[in-house]
Amino acid sequence: MKLIVGLGNPGKEYENTRHNAGFRFIDSYAKAKNLNFNKEKFNGLYTDFFYGSEKVILLKPQKYMNLSGEVIKEYINFYKIKINNMLIIVDDLDTEVGKIKLRYKGSSGGHNGLKNIEKELQTQEYKRLKIGISNDKSKDSIDYVIGKVSKKELELMNSVNEQAESLIDDFLSMNFDNVMNKYNSKG
C-alpha cells in the first residue's frame, strides 16, 4: 500500500496561497485520474484506488499545516503503511517557482508541516516532492507562504502541476532513484 500526501491548509481563504502547493499538485493528479476526494477519516480528505494490484491512498490533511503530521500518523498506523511507501508533496521556499526537487530524506528546513511530520513519525527519512515557491526575503516568511500567489506564479505552478500524473505514476511504478534522476534533472 502507498500513501501520497499533499500538504496545505484547509479552507477557502488558503486556496490560492503558496503554502497550498501540495494540495494543488495532488488535486491535479486526482483530476487526471477522475478521482474525487470524497472520503473523510482522521481529519483527512482522501480517495483511494488501485495502481495495478497495489492500493494507493491520496490524502489531504484537514488540520492546519503545522498539525498535518498528526493526520498522517493516523493513516500510517490504521492502514499499516510503511514510511518508505509514503510520498509527501510540499511547498519549498528554497526552490524557484516552477521547479521541483525529489528527496529521500532531509531536515524540515524550517517548514512547519515537515517539522510536525518528523515529530509524529520520529524520523526525517521519508520521501518528499518539494514544489518551489521561491522566497521573497523582503517579506516575513509566514506572511509570504500564506499570501496569495500572483497570476505569473500560478502559471508557473500550474506548469509543475501538469507533471502530476506522470510523476506520481512514475513514483508508483519505478524505483525512487530513477524517479529522482528523471525529474530532478529537468531544467
Image (tube, rainbow, N blue to C red):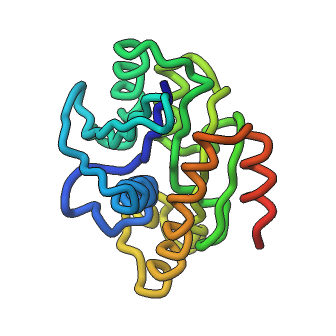
Q: Say which quadrant the C terminus sits in.
A: bottom right
Q: In this view, does 159 lie above or below 66?
A: below
Front one among 103 and 69: 103
User: Where residue 71 sits: x, y (%)?
Assistant: 34, 28
Residue drawn where x is 69% and y is 41% of the image: 174
Front one among 57 and 62: 57
Q: Is residue 67 above or below residue 130?
A: above
130 vs 78, left or right, is right
User: Where residue 145 sits: x, y (%)?
Assistant: 45, 61
Residue drawn where x is 37% and y is 50% of the image: 8
Residue drawn where x is 28% and y is 61% of the image: 14
Q: Is residue 101 above or below residue 173?
A: below
165 vs 39, left or right, is right
User: Where residue 134 sits: x, y (%)?
Assistant: 60, 69
User: Where residue 73 sits: x, y (%)?
Assistant: 41, 21
Q: Is residue 181 above or below residue 66?
A: below
Front one among 91 and 174: 174
Residue drawn where x is 48% and y is 64% of the image: 140
